[in-house]
Image: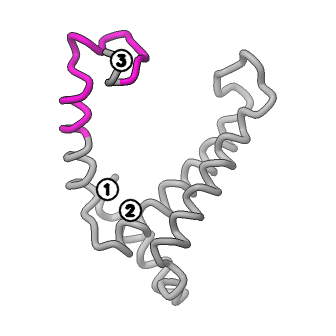
Amino acid sequence: MKQKTIDDIIRFSDERNWKQFHNPKDLSISISLEAAELLEAFQWSGADTGTEGRIDRIREELADVMIYGVLMADACGLDLDEIIEEKMRRNGEKYPVKKAYGSSKKYTEL
């Protein structure tokens, strides 16, 4: 995500004096609710796991999840690049290519 996008999200919130509502608990709840709305785009779709006919809804709900994620990082004083890079490094250790390639198994099963 571009720094400008992050700055725009925070500025949007600040212009409306919403930071007072953006504590980690409430932001966590909001992330979960928006993720559930994203999941709802696929509800009752059976074996149809594609995006056809759903992409507008997916875009909207995914944007909400990401916006709340940025606000959560801001509220907790976390650098998004730093925490994502660290998580990817740890995932690389748990899921080495030689063991995880083409497998959906959890790292404890590899």
Residue 109 is labelled as 3
Q: Nearer the viewer, residue 16 or 105?
A: 105
- Can you tell which of label 1 and label 3 is closer to the viewer? 3
- Tag 3 or tag 2, which sits nearer the N-term? 2
Residue 58 horizontal/vertical position (percent) = 63, 41
Per the image, label 2 sits on a secondary structure element best described as helix
Is 91 included in the stretch rendered in magenta?
Answer: yes
Tag 2: amino acid? Thr
Residue 5 vertical placement versus 55 (above, below): below
Residue wearing tag 2:
5
Residue 102 vertical placement versus 41 (above, below): above
Residue extent of the magenta highlight? 88-106
At x 33%, y 24%, the residue is 108
Residue 77 horizontal/vertical position (percent) = 28, 73
Q: Nearer the viewer, residue 40 or 67?
A: 40
In the picture provided, is 51 more to the left or to the right than 87?
A: right
- Can you tell which of label 2 and label 3 is closer to the viewer? 3
Is 93 included in the stretch rendered in magenta?
Answer: yes
Residue wearing tag 1:
2
Tag 1: amino acid? Lys
Q: Write down the quadrant of residue 82 in the picture.
A: bottom left
Per the image, label 1 sits on a secondary structure element best described as loop
Residue 47 is labelled as none
Q: Are marks 1 and 2 in contact (CB under 8 Å)?
A: yes
Q: Are marks 1 and 3 in contact (CB under 8 Å)?
A: no
Residue 15 horizontal/vertical position (percent) = 49, 86
